[in-house]
Image (spheres, rainbow, N blue to C red):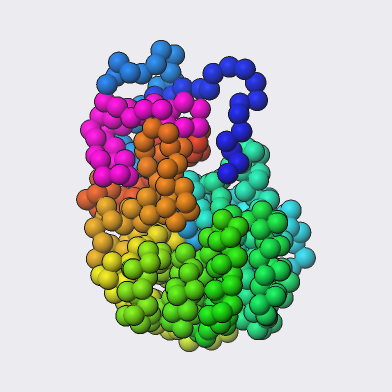
């Protein structure tokens, strides 16, 4: 990925020494009184030996805190920005005359809130006008502060679903036949996406139906072509049928997917297909139902809550069956910043806090194909580090609520410790 460009001019990269009361490295190791040496954008060493701190290193004292790896959210929509100075409802703003450049500029707030939640990397699964590609480039060149982004461009979808009727859909990802799928996918790759997203069922925001849209053959064609380009395929399916075919077609991750049958769940476990249930996003919709201008709010809320129940139950069964999970929030609009609440659901369905943390570190990094650079605090990895208050292995809420300081690629991108020390 970009961001690995050599330093523009002569001079050694900056060296920083971070001291933590405790460190959870993401690879199963827990250290007391840990020192992390950061050189440029990478971690050079993790030690308890103060003598190893290079002369002239900038010292950062975080001994009051526990270090965890920068978190990874594998399902976001950062470019979906709700401009609250406008009277227009959130989804209607996306199809409005707002220019792409304006959307990207405004989305900086979503990026900032995401970082403040301790999320230093996202897999952004769907955007219009290549807004996500623009945002990724701006962040990688240092012109915008935000998490490192792996983006999907337009999701590939059939004409009739989703988006729902009345929604002025962007033409970018529409594909109604095998040749269409091949063309759209090649366009996405040419535009520079990191990952391919395909909608294999209906269902989005208030619509919780899960009718299959693409056939097995169509998903298989997308998976094969994506893989040929070295890209992974993320398949959206609200219901079980799209998921059943997507798993067998070779999708790398299944998004949402309620009511999956046992055979599909065991097939996921066997193949190592990642499950990204995104349980919490319907919690967010239900909680903020009045902002959308939807009629029949009560009925929609009932549908969302019923979906949450089935989503949770499916995830519980999948976890029991040994399916690999990655944390995805499906955050958009003001849900950006609440990305890690998904971890609370994971603990509720049976994971230990450590297993939940892994879904947002090592597992998520592996899903991105970046397991040697992201998701752990270890030499050679990106210096993506979060300081939290409390013990994340004892209580998942510590990770969700107690983020105090965030470093991404060796730069401090959020710091609430100063405020705290002053009070
Ligand atoms: Zn999504």
* Residue occupying the point 70% across, 74% down: 180
The picture places residue 228, in percent across and down from the top left corner, at 58, 60
| Region of the chain picked out in magenta, as a range | 20-48
The picture places residue 78, in percent across and down from the top left corner, at 58, 57
The image quadrant where one finds the N terminus is top right
Observer able to see residue 420: no
- Say left or right for 282 vs 359: right
The picture places residue 368, in percent across and down from the top left corner, at 48, 53
The answer to which quarter of the image holds residue 28 is top left
Count of numbered tags: 0
- Say left or right for 48 vs 176: left
Q: Is 44 inside the magenta-drawn segment?
A: yes
Q: Is residue 195 above or below residue 377?
A: below
Q: Nearer the viewer, residue 146 or 158?
A: 158
* Residue occupying the point 37% across, 50% down: 362
* Residue occupying the point 46% across, 37% down: 382
The picture places residue 210, in percent across and down from the top left corner, at 49, 83
* Residue occupying the point 74% across, 53% down: 101
Observer able to see residue 136: yes
Q: Is residue 172 above or below residue 141?
A: below
Q: Is residue 34 above or below residue 391?
A: above
Q: Is 68 inside the magenta-drawn segment?
A: no
Q: Nearer the viewer, residue 80 or 228?
A: 228
| Helix, strand or loop: magenta stretch | strand
Q: Nearer the viewer, residue 281 or 352?
A: 352
The image quadrant where one finds the C terminus is top left
């Amino acid at each position: 990925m970009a961001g690995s460009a050599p330093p523009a001019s002569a001079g050694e990269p900056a060296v920083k020494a971070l001291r933590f009361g405790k460190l959870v490295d993401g690879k199963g190791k827990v250290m007391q009184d840990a020192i992390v040496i950061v050189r440029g954008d990478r971690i050079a060493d993790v030690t308890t030996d103060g003598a190893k701190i290079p002369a002239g290193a900038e010292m950062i004292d975080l001994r009051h805190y526990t270090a965890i790896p920068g978190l990874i959210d594998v399902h976001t929509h950062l470019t979906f920005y709700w401009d609250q100075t406008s009277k227009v409802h959130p989804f209607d703003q996306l199809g409005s005359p707002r220019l792409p450049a304006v959307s990207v500029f405004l989305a900086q707030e979503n990026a900032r809130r995401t970082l403040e939640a301790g999320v230093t990397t996202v897999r952004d699964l769907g955007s219009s006008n290549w807004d996500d590609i623009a945002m990724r480039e701006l962040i990688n060149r240092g012109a915008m502060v935000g998490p490192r982004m792996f983006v999907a461009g337009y999701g590939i979808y059939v004409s009739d679903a989703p988006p729902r009727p009345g929604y002025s859909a962007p033409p970018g990802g529409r594909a109604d036949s095998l040749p269409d799928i091949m063309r759209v996918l090649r366009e996405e790759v040419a535009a520079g996406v990191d990952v391919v997203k395909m909608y294999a069922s209906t269902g989005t925001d208030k619509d919780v139906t899960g009718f299959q849209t693409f056939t097995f053959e169509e998903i298989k064609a997308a998976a094969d072509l994506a893989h040929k380009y070295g890209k992974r395929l993320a398949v959206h399916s609200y219901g079980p049928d799209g998921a059943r075919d997507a798993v067998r077609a070779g999708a790398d991750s299944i998004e949402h997917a309620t009511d999956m049958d046992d055979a599909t769940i065991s097939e996921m476990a066997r193949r190592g297909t990642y499950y990204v249930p995104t349980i919490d996003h319907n919690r967010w919709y239900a909680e903020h139902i009045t902002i959308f201008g939807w009629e029949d709010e009560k009925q929609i809320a009932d549908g969302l809550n019923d979906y949450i129940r089935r989503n949770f139950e499916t995830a519980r069964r999948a976890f029991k069956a040994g399916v690999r999970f990655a944390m995805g929030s499906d955050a958009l609009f003001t849900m950006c910043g609440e990305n890690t609440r998904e971890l609370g659901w994971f603990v509720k369905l049976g994971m230990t806090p450590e297993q939940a943390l892994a879904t947002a570190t090592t597992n998520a990094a592996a899903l991105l194909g970046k397991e040697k650079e992201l998701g752990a605090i270890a030499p050679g990895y990106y210096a993506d580090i979060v300081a939290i208050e409390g013990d994340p292995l004892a209580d998942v809420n510590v990770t969700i609520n107690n983020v105090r300081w965030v470093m991404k690629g060796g730069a401090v991108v959020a710091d609430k410790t100063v405020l705290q020390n002053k009070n």
